[in-house]
Image (cartoon, rainbow, N blue to C red):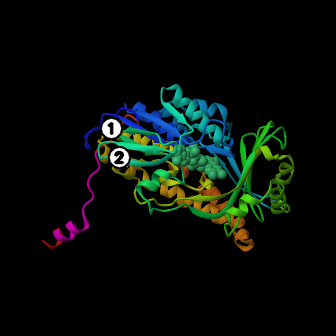
Amino acid sequence: MNAHRSTAPDSPARTALVIGGGVAGPVAALALRKAGIEARVFEAYAPGTGSAGGPLSLAANGLNALRVVGADTAVAGEGLPTPRMAIHSGTGKTLGVIETDPDLPGHVTLPRGRLAELLQAEAASAGVQVVTGKRFVDAVDTGRSVIATFDDHTTAEADLLIGCDGIRSAVRGVIAPSGPQPRYTGLIGFGGWVEGPAVPDTHGTFHMIFGRRAFFGYLADGERTAWFANLPERRLDRDALRANSFDEWMQRLRAAFADDAGPALDLLDHVRPEGFIPASPLEDLPHVPSWSKGRIALVGDAAHATSPSSGQGASLAAESAVELARCLRDLPVEAAFTAYERGRRVRVERIIAEAARTNQSKAAGPLAARVRDAVMPFFMSRFATPERTAWQHAHTIDWDAEVRAPMRRPELGGTRAARKR
Ligand SMILES: Cc1cc2nc3c(=O)[nH]c(=O)nc-3n(C[C@H](O)[C@H](O)[C@H](O)COP(=O)(O)OP(=O)(O)OC[C@H]3O[C@@H](n4cnc5c(N)ncnc54)[C@H](O)[C@@H]3O)c2cc1C
């Protein structure tokens, strides 16, 4: 165990243990460091042991959050520029095109695992200790510090513990053992990257196709193609998903897209097992009642996982990580955690709810699909404009603005008593 000088409950934190080295973890560590709090990151997997991951698009608001900690350039430099999204029906009709605001940082797409690698490297080069191959299992909050235990029976201690360990967070299990579990969306997801000119260059357009039986997305720069597919699967059987072979999935995907316009079938011909991310259930976490307890707090998917349909999960994780650090910079621990949660909850839960509505469109039956294809062009032209989506994409964090202590919410009993008087 590292020597740790414990702090009084109401004094500002000086040290933190950050669990998870995905998106939220490295960004939180960088932001905490900027706030004057020394953070160490503990990631369960050793470098190179996870898969590279399917495509992940990072939006302008995510890049803005990364800019606060100086990590935007490295990420933007590796991603495929993705300035627009085009939505099509399975018949080949274009239902709408969403251009990103040219005044905002351009969206980029890169493998999910690569994003984590880049952010870990940024944290390490800024002087953050990133310990890999160490799985968090438990924590004890002493009231003046937190002591974490790992699966190799070692421990670490700091003023705070920040759980950035994803949608199945073990840290969340410690602070809320009977708390909410991830919710299955009714869709399973696949994806990957194909090397070589499998489909023509899409010149920065991420094409999304509401097919007759399933949803397909692809983006190509002539040298590599990012793709994903969402298949409706009403009853989730995780064992059956795991048991299916690559060939079986390819057969099922070909059947799902057999009657759709677009290059899905051509692209599937080029997919190889090593570049294929097999089926996983798409899930979200719409409402975690409390994001902190004592000296432990949750950030990113551990607190507010949106399903991939929002294209916002990583961006929100980065935003929350920076905001938590800003609160801890200016306030003692308890007040900081309260200010952080109050500042973030409405925004993230609104995005999670919007993504859930998109999931319903992806799993629409034939009649609902016809209605969707008929009304979507109208809605896209009215609501998918840069002005209408600015609340998501143009969101920025004012790092220098001071965070004020949150007002206490009036107790219900107290209010009634006051009314009686
Ligand atoms: C198929 C798919 C597509 C997606 N597409 C997009 C997209 O286009 N755009 C977008 O913004 N978001 C997308 N997302 C969501 C995005 O990946 C997440 O919202 C984001 O990664 C959340 O970051 P995080 O750091 O909170 O969690 P994660 O990225 O999940 O990181 C958690 C980390 O904690 C580690 N960990 C877990 N348990 C422990 C433990 N006990 N001890 C130590 N370490 C632990 C994990 O190994 C992992 O590295 C997608 C998600 C999926 C599944």
Which amino acid, mark 1?
A: Ala
- Residue, far left: 421
Region in magenta: 405-417
Which amino acid, mark 2?
A: Arg
**What residue appears at the point 42 percent right and 58 percent down from the top-left corner?**
176
Q: Secondary structure at mark 1?
A: loop
Q: Position of residue 40 (x, y in %)?
A: 46, 34
Q: Earlier in the sequence, mark 2 or mark 1?
A: 1
* Picture quadrant where residue 52 is located: top right
The count of marks equals 2
Side of 415 relative to 4 (left or right): left
Is the N terminus in the top left, top right, bottom left or bottom right quadrant? top left
Q: Is residue 386 visible?
A: no
**What residue appears at the point 78 percent right and 38 percent down from the top-left corner?**
224
* Picture quadrant where residue 203 is located: top right
Q: Is residue 184 above or below residue 195?
A: below
Q: Is residue 279 visible?
A: yes
Side of 340 relative to 105 (left or right): left
Q: What residue is disc 2 on?
A: 295
Q: Position of residue 268 (x, y in %)?
A: 83, 51
Q: Residues within 10 Å of mark 1 (few under 14, many from 20)?
A: many
Q: What residue is disc 1 on?
A: 13
